[in-house]
Image (cartoon, grey):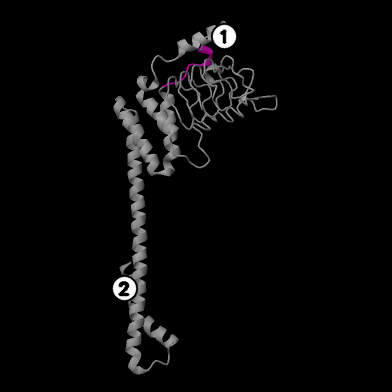
Amino acid sequence: MICSSLLLVTFVTVVAPRYLLSWDAPGTPVSGLAKAINDIRTTLLQGLAGIALLIGAFFSWRQLQVSNQSQITQRFAAAVEQLGSPSPGVRLGAIFALERIADDSPYDRVTIAEVLCAFVQSSGPADPPSARPVARDPAHKLELALMHRAADSLSVRRTDRQAAMTVLGRRALVPNRYVLGLARTDLRGTRLAFADLEKADLHYSDLSDVNLESADLGADLTGIWLAGSFLRGARLHQADLRGADLTGTEASRASLAGAVADASTVWPADFDAAAAGVVTADDSAPLPRPQTWYDLPR
């Protein structure tokens, strides 16, 4: 590398000026020959210095990028390790550290969303539909739904899981809208007001007594349990509500235009689904999600 640089400098300062002068200005008088060669040499050296500066700047930028990626990788690995800590405070810090990494590195947003979804799912699977209480009549169904609701909100029972859902609900978007994998998850008592859960996969999850005010729920809600949840201002456009249970839900001001339902959908008392713009699935509609794996043959 050093030899190549020396050869280049020698060529620029000795050979190139005379060649360029004889090619571009062959009639230069002898008295001005030295000055002309020096001018060409100066110009070539300045150009060479500029090129060297650009090359140095590129390699410095590249080194900085590599260093930043290395730091992000170390931060990510540390945060994921801390998610498994027995200390709730450490887990909480890890969740918000992952959110900060997602803000700093768009390339890692999908991976971080997957990690947080896995954390929420692993720490709180929902009861299978077969374990849900069977009601004798609508009044008894509402009573059972109220009994099933969490005594405390998720933020009281599991602060870290609530934090993970909060981060997922306000995550920065990625191209093609990554689908949040939150199927069959116990999310009772979660506070998700204004959360963006569009295209989330929440089928067979338990969202009883959840605050979903003004949340975006254009998601797969097949078989979901929304008993006693608050849906005022929520947007459920294109949501799949087949098999969903909305017993006792405050859905009077929810936006349901284009949501899909069928005979298995349970609505709140006196709720007019057709007037709300709900579309009834017919034989041409795609099949609903299969039953949860709890009910599959062993």
Whether residue 270 sits left or right of residue 35 in the image: it is: right
Q: Quadrant of the N terminus?
A: bottom left
Residue that mark 1 sits on: 138
Instruction: Tell me the magenta residue range.
Output: 124-131
Q: Position of residue 70 (x, y in %)?
A: 34, 46
Along the viewing direction, whichever of 260 and 38 lies nearer the viewer: 260
- Specify the label residue 295 is tagged with: none
Q: Position of residue 265 (x, y in %)?
A: 60, 18
- Write the residue at 34% across / 67% down: 52
Q: Main secondary structure of the magenta part?
A: loop
Few, some or many C-alpha atoms within 10 Å of disc 2 (few <14, some 14-19, many ≥20)?
Answer: few
Along the viewing direction, whichever of 46 and 156 lies nearer the viewer: 156
Amino acid at circle 1:
Pro
Q: Is residue 127 magenta?
A: yes
Instruction: Work out which residue is located at the far right of the displayed protein and give it.
Output: 283
Few, some or many C-alpha atoms within 10 Å of disc 1 (few <14, some 14-19, many ≥20)?
Answer: few
Q: Position of residue 283 (x, y in %)?
A: 70, 24
